[in-house]
Amino acid sequence: MVFQKKVKLISSEKLTSDLFRLRFFCPEVAKGAKPGNFAHIRISQNTTPLLRRAFSIFDVDLKKKTFDILFKVVGLGTKILSEKKKGESLDVLGPLGNSFLISSKEQNLVLVAGGMGIAPLMFLASYLVKSEKIKREKISFLYGEKTKNNFVCLGQLKKLGVKTVLTTEDGTKGFKGKVTDLFLKRRIKLGIGKNCFIYSCGPQKMMKKMSELSKKYDLFCQLSLETHMPCGLGACFGCVVKYIKNDTTPLAGQATYKRICVDGPIFDAREVELD
Amino acid sequence: MQERLSLIDLKVKIGKIIFKNSVLVASGTFGYGEEYSELFDLNRLGGIITKSVTLNPREGNPPPRTCETPSGMLNSIGLANIGIEKFIQEKLPFLRKFNTRIIVNVAGSTVDEYLQVVEKLNRAKGVDMLEINISCPNVVEGGMVFGSDPECAFRCVKSIRKATDYPLVTKLTPNVRDIGEIALAVEDAGSDCVSLINTLVGMAIDSKTKKPLLANITGGLSGPAIKPVALAMVWKVAQKVKIPVVGIGGITNTEDALEFLLAGASLIQVGTSNFIDPQTAIKIIEGLKNYCKGNKISKIKSLIGKLKIGD
């Protein structure tokens, strides 16, 4: 069930120089959201910026009936959002989109986050640990940033007790290099193989790389894709990704376009073609 | 108060069709209706215009297909749709459950394609009207080509007129020298009314990457940015033709809707604003009701074309 509601901003927290965490009181989204879902938020009552902005659900609190988003200031929309004050109301549509497929078997789970890709994967990690279906020793979290000051949620990750491996492009913390390099290097050690569930979110280039690696090694990897979305409801067909079905049905191998907002944002990395 | 409000007559009649109110949702911005059905009661709308339907399914243009511009957005979807067969089988049964007017938007790359779609719709149940899209700016064949030349527009609409008993509304493009000329041509061809405007051809460039922001390079501009253009064209066309005019272009609130009615629109369509606030159409319906009540207007149709010029 999708809701449209005016929801109150409970808190706005500046995590790094350009990274913000907003918390909204919204029982419907707190209760209904699954890891991978997103909220479509109206930024302004003015006509510029005109369109809503989509944000992955970063956290929910069922008791306090809140949900959180995490975002970086990249343009006018996110700048306005970062200036919203506690107590203000915003028009929210959600929860929207599909969600990560959660494994019910005892197997290795590897979460691969790059930069802001931490948002949906943090929600997923908390969900997996809370569900207690999977032993936390089976969960690895690979997290890459440009530099050490950009990392967020390290305390939370430690608390969750999942195996966390960090990497920075400038080498100021953890491994030096991109998180996809780390993924490749640690592939064997982390037991990444056909029976493993991989979840990944990050910038477009990283998603492309993860998609290529998944195809090359035939890995089951779910990507959370991001794009501009006018409606968020599947009505406008504006937010599509090239999609090739990877199975034995008659449609296998045929390229089509899928809407990221309703057919995604979660896709099997072997089934999408990214630019 | 509830009783007083209910005395206000929001109904508008076009040909034989009675619309319960003047507010419809525009093609391409409301999917096939189901996408919005969890958010409000679709029965409250004056009408729903479906996403364009073509003979065969269409994948549409490569992404990126949309981009935001000041007070507007560009789109280049390219008539992505499931095709007429699937539309009739899978989408129409849902739509016809609602007590609102269902208008199917028909597009094609040749006149024959339009006719084949119309032929299939003739045998379908639950359709009240057809909107003939001769104005899509984002396809190579057909689309805007039919709507840019009065003779082509006449031929296309005339052939469809002969092929069906459905009332026709022809959707016009603003990307022409004289939209009044095209409107007259489709009136002559037997269109029951005209709707305008479709999107204006536009473009956006990222100066950092030196690349266009749409993969199709150009697209159609919609949203509040185009409202003044739409209003002028609706006014112009309403002077020219005898058939009713349906106003479209950047309508986001009750005041906008009133402006279009005053300029001569019998009905209005909410488009891009459905993305920004899915409740826009419902808010406008309520707003029009309250406006009539506040101004002691008993019938909304008495406002149509009542623009005051001069003293």
Image (cartoon, helix red, strand yellow):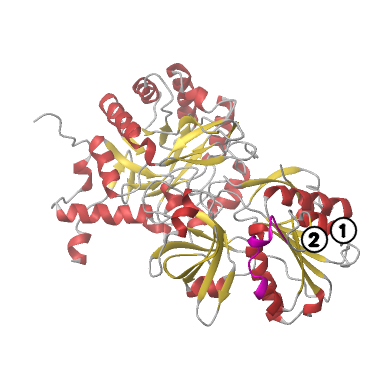
Magenta-highlighted residues: A144-155
Chain letter of disc 2 in the image:
A
Q: Secondary structure at mark 2?
A: strand
Q: Are marks 2 and 1 in contact (CB under 8 Å)?
A: yes
Using the image as rendered, state which of residue B190 and residue A222 is in the foreground: A222
Q: Residues within 10 Å of mark 1 (few under 14, many from 20)?
A: few
User: Amino acid type of disc 1?
Assistant: Lys
User: Amino acid type of disc 2?
Assistant: Phe
Compute the Cα span from label 2 to label 1. Answer: 11 Å
Q: Visible in this render: residue A99?
A: no
Count numbered badges in the picture.
2
Residue B180: image x %, image y %? 34, 22
Q: Quadrant of residue B224?
A: top left
Q: Are marks 2 and 1 on the same chain?
A: yes
Residue B266: image x %, image y %? 29, 39
Chain letter of disc 1 in the image:
A
Query: Residue farthest to the right?
Result: A188
Q: Quadrant of residue A264?
A: bottom right
Residue B194: image x %, image y %? 37, 32
In magenta segment, residue A66: no
**Residue B255 to residue B238: above or below:** below
Q: Visible in this render: residue B84?
A: yes
Q: Which residue is mark 1?
A: A185
* Residue drawn at x 40%, y 65% as measured from the top left: A85
Q: Secondary structure at mark 1?
A: helix
* Residue drawn at x 78%, y 47% as measured from the top left: A251
Q: Which residue is mark 2?
A: A175
**Residue B211 to residue A262: above or below:** above
Quadrant where the C terminus of chain A lies?
top right
